[in-house]
Amino acid sequence: MHPRPRRPAGAALTLVALVATAGCSGESAEPAAAQEGGWSFTDDLGTTVELDATPARVAGLNDVIASLWNYGVEPVAGFGQTSAAGDVAFEGKDLTDLEIVGESYGQIDLERLAAADPDLIVTSVYPTDSSGALDPTQPLYGFESLQQQEQVAQIAPIVAIAYRGSAAEVIERTVELAESLGADGATIDAAREEYDAAAAELTTAGERGITVLPVYATATDGWWMGKAPDDPSLRLYSDLGVDFVDPGGDTYFWEAVSWEQVPEHPSDVILYSLRGGETPEQMRAQPTYTLLPAVQAGQEHPWEYVGMDHTAQAAYMSELAGWLDQARKVT
């Protein structure tokens, strides 16, 4: 749900010999645009990738490829913080033809990625602070180091979408990328209609004034509270009227406190991260957790990582609206 710290893999990467391929076989299905000339896309770091034809085989970070898939651009390989097989972003998708080349942050099987023969690799990039500034000297999201990123770039060119500001803005950038890759306009229009309806539903639910606190927590790391202005999805929901608790502090994205300080941050509803954090049942082992009014009211719900696309956001906004409609005011 959030940009997690980049952790070293421990063991050094094994250099692999990457043999450049001359493109897809004649049997591969390609977007119509691929037959009409070259392809070009400028990503959010200002990098322009130019290819002789529209990429037909796309690989990359699970967060991004799941969104492209919702617009009809089916990926050939993916990597991320978890396996695509266990990622809610891929629910309902047939993963038979998806090569899973990474199942934890920064762990990418380069040989398997190369064997998937991608034409393009997509990922995201997070700002360095609340200003939205990007640092091109740091690895893009999903890569453990610049060395690994450079090795991946030998397999296929990389484009990055910035996950900053409101998800509404990031979604439009994702749409631009999807359209360039041959996504069907009717699919995009239908997804946009669902999104608009869910946004209206969430705005109505937000009028009840139910306070919401998104958290990532573990027994060892303590209690990390998400800051709505810094998370694109939370910022979107806030703009639509959801009342998120301001955890205070001047740090970017998170305010972290010890378990002893947890009762100082009450809310009507708690959203708990599904990406590595503890479940409410596990958090109940901490005596201070049970003192929270949202916990005593049983108003705890999953904080899912939601892709930067209309379909994923619509589904979660509708779910969130339902929780807010059902919640009692307990603070």
Image: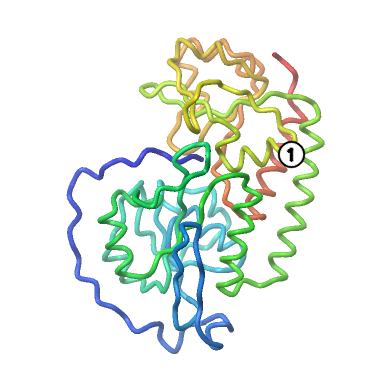
Image spot of residue 43 (x, y percent): 49, 62
The local crowd at label 1, few if under 14, some if 14 to 19, many if 20 or more residues have their Cα within 10 Å, is some
- Residue at 52% x, 25% y: name it: 280
| Colouring mode (rainbow / by chain / secondary structure / one colour) | rainbow
Judge left or right: residue 265 versus residue 329: left
Residue 40 against residue 158 in the figure, above or below: below
- Residue 180 to residue 251: above or below: below
Element under disc 1: loop
Residue 251 or residue 195, whichever sits in front: 251
* Numbered-mark total: 1
The C terminus: image quadrant: top right
Q: Find residue 209 and report its horizontal and vertical position in percent.
A: 76, 24
In the rendered view, would you say 123 is above or below 87? below
Q: Position of residue 329 (x, y in %)?
A: 74, 18
Q: Amino acid at mark 1?
A: Leu
Q: Give above or below for 4 relative to 109.
A: above
Residue 82: x and y, percent? 41, 47
Residue at (80% x, 44% y) in the render: 200
Q: Nearer the viewer, residue 21 or 129?
A: 129
- Residue at 48% from the left image edge and 21% from the top image edge: 283
Left or right, 35 with respect to 114, comes to right
Residue depicted at 66% across the width and 17% down the height: 297
Q: Kindly identify which residue carries mark 1.
A: 240
